[in-house]
Amino acid sequence: MKTVAEREKQLRDRMAYLLANMEKIEAELDHPLDKDGEDAAIDIEDDEVLEDLGNADKLEVRQIEAALKRIEDGEYGYCVDCGDKISEERLDLLPQTPFCAKCAENH
């Protein structure tokens, strides 16, 4: 069973990783497109994939920020919908989750 402090460190470490990854994605997206038609099409496809990855990272960062706020408020580990305790197993898999397994099915 992890302590709240251990969960907070895990969340902060993950957020640092995501922010660094987002910087790499931004740097990659800033490169000029290849002028050759076929290569340009591949570059555009690659950029779309990178943008999707960046958007997923941004969403996860927002979820982590919300989890850190719940830690600060003393509400971490409790479902924001029903107020029940979130299982340790669920928090091990998704430390930023705001929902117990039952309420997550409804979202």
Image (cartoon, helix red, strand yellow):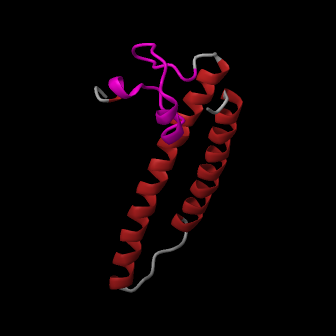
Q: Which residues are magenta?
A: 76-103
- 101 horizontally vs 17: left or right: left
Q: Against 79, is 12 above or below?
A: below
- 31 horizontally vs 7: left or right: left
* Nearer to me, 31 or 89: 89
Of the 4 image quadrants, the one containing the C terminus is top left
Q: Against 80, is 10 above or below?
A: below
Q: How many marks?
A: 0
* Nearer to me, 58 or 4: 4
- Give the farthest residue toward the front: 1
In which image quadrant can residue 23 be found? bottom right
Whether the magenta-drawn stretch holds residue 82 is answered as yes
Whether the magenta-drawn stretch holds residue 46 is answered as no
Q: Position of residue 2 (x, y in %)?
A: 64, 33
Of the 4 image quadrants, the one containing the N terminus is top right
Dominant SS of magenta comes to loop
Which residue is located at x 38 percent, y 70 percent? 44
Which residue is located at x 41 percent, y 55 percent? 52
* Nearer to me, 8 or 86: 86
